[in-house]
């Protein structure tokens, strides 16, 4: 799925600037108190704000396994497209110059994901969404002085349609909770009770029947398939019991 990446395209400063976490409403039915306490009485869930979940729109359109597969293929293709776009903005001088003019040299531009860190793809998508106005402005610009005809043609072929943005946003929304779970479990002292809480919250999130869009529903259905296999079927009962 990943193309060969030049390590010079990825810098730690860019990655650190994308470490900010956007607010997310965890399902309130999981926790009926303000925070979860471990065996030592320490708070575990100060990291999350448990607000009332927003009322989502029910998506009643039926889906098949083929629908799920086809959308995953499309997501894979779209992520590859994002990688090519980001690579060009980081390697092609006229594009770099334009970006620096618009946002300044000291602000984070586009970042490229790396294979060894799963959530780097989420960070790449997150930054792309935050800079959507800049992306649209770049494609709307008539010409970039210094681009070769081949570069110009390649760049124009990467334009993101409205439907592409809808899918990118749905993909981002569905992975956002996993990024937060990764951050939470990457602390110095993750406990079993914390792991169990995070696991159950992730399961409840992908099993929800109300979704903002059809794309959200399909992606969550795919994630639920993975949850059923790796957690319900693959994970031994003794291990699941020990996590409680």
Image (tube, helix red, strand yellow):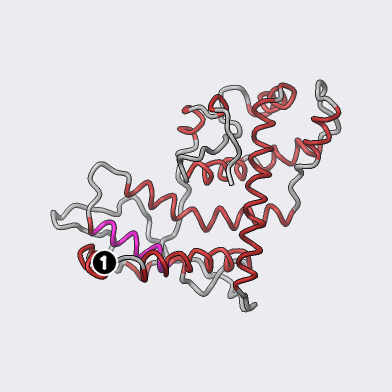
Q: Which residues are magenta?
A: 193-204
How many marks the image carries: the answer is 1
Residue 41 falls within the magenta-colored stretch = no
Quarter holding the C terminus is bottom left
Q: Residues within 10 Å of mark 1 (few under 14, many from 20)?
A: few
Circle 1 sits in a helix, a strand or a loop, which is it? Answer: helix
Q: Quadrant of residue 188?
A: top left
Residue in front for this viewpoint, 194 or 151: 151
The residue that disc 1 covers is 240
Residue 203 falls within the magenta-colored stretch = yes
Q: Residue at x 65, y 33 (%)?
A: 87
Task: Please identify the residue farthest to the left as the structure is shown.
Answer: 40
Q: Residue at x 68, y 28 (%)?
A: 99
Q: Residue at x 81, y 25 (%)?
A: 147
| 244 on left or right of 206 | left
Q: Quadrant of residue 52?
A: bottom left
- Most frequent secondary structure within the magenta stretch: helix
- Horizontal and vertical percent position of residue 135: 70, 39
Residue in front for this viewpoint, 200 or 116: 116
Q: Residue at x 42, y 70 (%)?
A: 228
Residue 68 higher or lower than 43, as above or below: below
Residue 81 higher or lower than 173, as above or below: above
């Amino acid at each position: 799925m990943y193309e060969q990446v030049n390590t010079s395209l990825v810098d730690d400063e860019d990655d650190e600037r994308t470490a900010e976490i956007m607010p997310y409403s965890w399902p309130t039915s999981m926790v009926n108190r303000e925070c979860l306490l471990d065996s030592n009485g320490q708070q575990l869930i100060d990291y999350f704000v448990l607000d009332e979940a927003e009322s989502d729109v029910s998506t009643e359109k039926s889906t098949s396994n083929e629908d799920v597969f086809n959308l995953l293929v499309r997501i894979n293709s779209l992520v590859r497209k994002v990688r090519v776009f980001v690579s060009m903005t980081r390697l092609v001088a006229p594009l770099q110059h334009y970006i620096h003019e618009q946002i300044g040299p000291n602000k984070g531009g586009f970042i490229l994901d790396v294979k060894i860190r799963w959530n780097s793809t989420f960070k790449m998508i997150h930054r792309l969404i935050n800079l959507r106005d800049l992306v649209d402005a770049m494609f709307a610009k008539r010409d970039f002085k210094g681009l070769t005809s081949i570069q110009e043609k390649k760049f124009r072929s990467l334009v993101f349609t409205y439907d592409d943005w809808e899918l990118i946003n749905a993909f981002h929304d569905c992975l956002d909770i996993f990024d937060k779970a990764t951050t939470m479990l990457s602390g110095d002292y993750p406990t079993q009770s914390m792991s169990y809480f995070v696991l159950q919250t992730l399961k409840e999130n992908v099993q929800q029947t109300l979704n903002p869009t059809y794309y959200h529903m399909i992606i969550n259905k795919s994630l639920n398939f993975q949850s059923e296999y790796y957690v319900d079927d693959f994970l031994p009962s003794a291990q699941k019991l020990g996590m409680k």
